[in-house]
Amino acid sequence: MNIHFIRDRYEADLDNQDYEEVRVECSTSLPDAPLIEGAVTGAARNGTKIVALHNESAPGTSGSEFVGRLIREQVANSAWRRGPPRGRAGAMRMTPVDVAEQVKARHAQALARSDPAC
């Protein structure tokens, strides 16, 4: 599964040694001032997309996208799920553009199936 969309969407570093867990790390510069809690949390809130990641981790939060749905789409579009394990190597070579095109094509297919006019 290509999870690089998480890196791009949240401007984060990823550490995924296996598919059981992915560690996401967001970083920013801290102000040249005494490091008090408000300054640190303000820098994290305003200098990273950690709040967006937090909000999108729970469905329905503030009308945000749900990252769980995005991950399910990535899994659904992976060659591993569609075919035998030998397809996994090809899926791992997919670029973020390839993934975006696959997601777009799947959306179009889903809309065509759900629209009775089609």
Image (cartoon, rainbow, N blue to C red):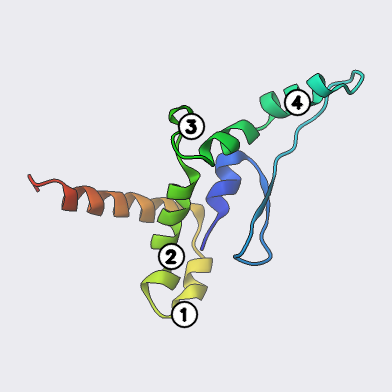
Q: Residue at x 48, y 32 (%)?
A: 61
Q: CA distance from mark 3 to mark 4?
A: 20 Å
Q: Within 10 Å of the Cα at label 1, are there few (<14), some (14-19), or many (20+) other Cα atoms? A: few
What's the mark number on residue 78?
2
- 43 over 116 or under it: above or below: above
Q: Amino acid at mark 1?
A: Pro
Q: CA distance from mark 2 to mark 4?
A: 37 Å
Query: Could you tell me residue 43's position as x and y percent?
Result: 75, 25
Residue that numbered label 4 is attached to: 41
Query: Could you tell me residue 38's position as x and y percent?
Result: 79, 20
Q: Residue at x 67, y 32 (%)?
A: 48
In this view, the mark in front (3 or 4): 3
Residue that numbered label 1 is attached to: 85
Q: Secondary structure at mark 1?
A: helix
- 114 over 92 or under it: above or below: above
Q: Amino acid at mark 3?
A: Thr
Q: Earlier in the sequence, mark 2 or mark 4?
A: 4
Horizontally, is 48 left or right of 58 in the view?
A: right
Q: Within 10 Å of the Cα at label 4, are there few (<14), some (14-19), or many (20+) other Cα atoms? A: few
Q: Earlier in the sequence, mark 1 or mark 3?
A: 3
User: Is residue 7 among what the camera can see?
Assistant: yes
What's the mark number on residue 61?
3
User: Is residue 77 among what the camera can see?
Assistant: no
Q: Residue at x 57, y 53 (%)?
A: 4
Q: Earlier in the sequence, mark 2 or mark 1?
A: 2
Q: Are marks 1 and 3 in contact (CB under 8 Å)?
A: no
